[in-house]
Image (spheres, rainbow, N blue to C red):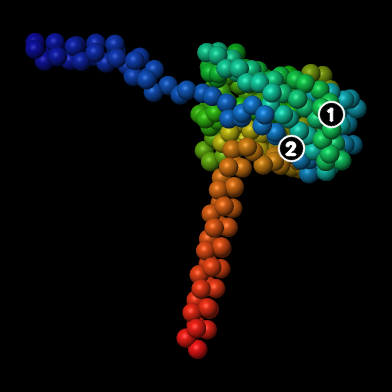
């Protein structure tokens, strides 16, 4: 009898505390960019004719692909970041894809919203607000976020966060809207530790690369580290030169 009472008591204790334990170890999500950060992406491959065939002739007239072409760069400048218990909201300036590599006046201002908790997304969710079909920013830790998102996304999406946080998309012809896309496509989007899209590749038939976009910038969180390394290296070189000169001078005095 005592044994049964002990077991029942242990079971009740486990039920009452399991929720508290799970909450204690719940992942706290944030965002990996800072105000005034500049993000630049470079387009390595852009098959315009094939994109016209897949998405129609207006695919590059608006949204994230505006004026996209091979060799062009696109820039974002983060203006503000607001995070509450539900939503991450980011306001940013955007310079659309351009070949000049000279950033003048911004082309537009835009915003990016996402849920803090991936469980808040609706079931069978599609990133249809992005012409890229994937976001260019995600909350961090991005691997855990994608893991939670995987149970909410539509079957078109597949998450692989084993090594590099990756969002795979496979869309069959006419699977989103009639004639959109007009051919089968596959997308592989890889994110870095800061939740920033690091690599975006859109494939067509026979795994032919149609779009290849890569992050191409020096983020603010890297600059202090590089400055530190340069300073340490410079001090080391200066110390070596001084020591070398002193050694040579002593050798001459011995002679």
Quarter of the picture holding the N terminus: top left
Judged left or right of residue 184, residue 238 is left
Who is closer to the viewer here, 246 or 168?
246
Judged left or right of residue 198, residue 23 is left
Visible residue check, residue 27: yes
Q: Residue 179 lies in what quarter of the image? A: top right
Who is closer to the viewer here, 128 or 4?
128
Question: Does 211 appear above or below 26?
Answer: below
Question: Does 51 appear above or below 23?
Answer: below
Query: What SS does tag 2 mark?
Result: strand
Who is closer to the viewer here, 17 or 113?
113
Q: Residue at x 14, y 14 (%)?
A: 6
> Of all residues shown, which one is farthest toward the bottom?
255
Circle 1 is placed at which residue position? 105
Q: Residue at x 79, y 18 (%)?
A: 177
Marked residue nearer the N-terminal end (2 or 1): 2
Q: Nearer the viewer, mark 2 or mark 1?
A: 1
Find residue 41 and name its label.
2
Residue 189 x %, y % = 66, 35
């Amino acid at each position: 009898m005592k044994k049964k009472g002990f077991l029942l008591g242990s079971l009740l204790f486990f039920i009452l505390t399991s929720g508290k334990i799970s909450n204690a170890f719940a992942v706290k999500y944030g965002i990996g960019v800072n105000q005034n950060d500049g993000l630049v992406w470079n387009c390595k491959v852009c098959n315009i004719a094939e994109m016209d065939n897949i998405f129609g002739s207006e695919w590059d007239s608006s949204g994230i692909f505006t004026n996209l072409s091979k060799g062009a760069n696109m820039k974002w400048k983060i203006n503000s970041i607001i995070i509450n218990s539900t939503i991450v909201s980011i306001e940013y300036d955007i310079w659309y894809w351009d070949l000049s590599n000279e950033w003048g006046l911004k082309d537009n201002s835009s915003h990016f919203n996402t849920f803090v908790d991936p469980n808040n997304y609706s079931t069978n969710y599609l990133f249809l607000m992005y012409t890229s079909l994937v976001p260019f920013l995600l909350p961090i830790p991005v691997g855990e976020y994608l893991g939670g998102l995987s149970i909410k996304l539509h079957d078109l999406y597949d998450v692989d966060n084993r090594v590099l946080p990756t969002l795979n998309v496979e869309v069959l012809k006419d699977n989103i809207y009639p004639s959109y896309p007009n051919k089968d496509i596959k997308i592989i989007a890889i994110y870095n530790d800061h939740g920033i899209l690091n690599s975006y590749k859109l494939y067509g038939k026979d795994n032919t690369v149609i779009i290849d976009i890569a992050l191409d910038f020096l983020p603010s969180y890297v600059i202090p580290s590089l400055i530190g390394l340069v300073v340490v290296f410079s001090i080391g070189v200066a110390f070596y030169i001084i020591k070398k000169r002193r050694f040579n001078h002593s050798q001459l005095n011995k002679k």
